[in-house]
Amino acid sequence: MRMERPTFQDILKAKNLIKNYLPRTPLYSYPQLNQLLDAKVYVKHENFLPTCAFKTRGGINLIYNLDREQREKGVITASTGNHALSIAYASNLFGVPATIVMPEKSNPVKVKAIRALGANIVFFGRIFEESKDYAEKLVGERGGRFIHPANEPFLIAGVATYALEIFEDCPNLDFLIVPVGGGSGASGCCLVKEAVNPKAQVIAVQAEKAPAAYLSWKNKKIVIDKMETAAEGLATKMGYELTQEILQDFLSDFVLVSEEEMVQAILLYLELVRNLSEEAGSSPLAAALKIKDRLKGKKVVLVLTGSNISMERLAQILAGRSS
């Protein structure tokens, strides 16, 4: 497996590919968010992509770059949802057989969307890491290309294209706040900012109830920790080598947010921006509110990475607000 970190040239190459298959997502500023944070705030709307999540970029870049034999044998991966959607979408686009291993109680909204794209779903395990281990076992039994959710240079280069768009639209930004599960998005943002605006600060966000990536970054080694968050996109139990290596070099800071803070940010997106977000997608806004004093008067980009929240979870959140 190709494991060297992607270069800026790899990201530019990915951009030239992905523009043929996906629209450029908007970067909008909203007066009410500006007032709330006392800063010039922009939202990068990755929730406007066809799968309603940023990872589609990485899936297209990786599946396109498979060799002929790999395409014929197919791919196997594991995911709580948005990574699975990206691989299913790209596999459907390029005619590649795809098997996705998902935890047994996965978000039904994501499951239905993955099935509609023609991927084969196997449910195994309670948490993502159990699904990932089983996916690797299936590769050993059946063959095919295992796609790791983070340790994949083509995935990182692909998702980094949204950071290219951000810096093209807002070249003088001060802070870029991005969620971290496996870390492909945050590491991609770090690679781009280092190439085009090293003074900008990339701040990563993870859930307090699933802090493994944060602890890995803080301790400069891979850490395994609890995974108890409702934020599917942040629900990883360990840090991953390739993304952590990049974050160690270029990430400015890491913020942990509570479940309640992410829920409040979902409600704020609904009320002030009229946009739906899942917990992972709302976490940058939650983090921005937590470090509001640091952001005062600055140009801040929040990455709204996805809006694939289940109807049941959304109903719970709205019911909690009215009670």
Image: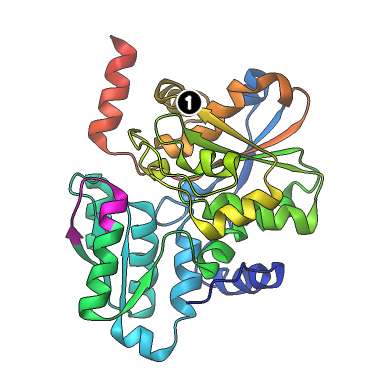
Residue 245 picture location, percent across and down: 61, 56
Q: Residues within 10 Å of mark 1 (few under 14, many from 20)?
A: many
Residue 250 picture location, percent across and down: 70, 50
- The residue sitting at 22% across, 61% down in the picture is 115
Instruction: Name the quadrant of the C terminus.
Output: top left
Q: Is residue 211 visible?
A: yes
Taking depth in this image into account, of 31 and 121 the one nearest to the observer is 121
Residue 118 picture location, percent across and down: 24, 69
Taking depth in this image into account, of 205 and 299 the one nearest to the observer is 205
Corner quadrant of residue 235: top left
Residue 90 part of the magenta-drawn span: no
Label 1: which secondary element = helix
Q: Is residue 117 visible?
A: no
In this rendering, is residue 173 above or below 51?
Answer: above
Give amino acid for label 1: Ala
Q: Residue 223 vs residue 246: left or right?
A: left
Corner quadrant of residue 203: top right
In this rendering, is residue 274 above or below 139?
Answer: above
In this rendering, is residue 210 above or below 163?
Answer: above
Q: Residue 169 vs residue 113: left or right?
A: right
Magenta residues span 122-131
Count of number-bearing discs: 1
- The residue sitting at 52% across, 38% down in the picture is 215
- The residue sitting at 61% across, 61% down in the picture is 161
Q: Which residue is mark 1?
A: 265
In this rendering, is residue 285 above or below 128?
Answer: above
Q: Residue 196 vs residue 71: left or right?
A: right
Residue 130 picture location, percent across and down: 26, 53
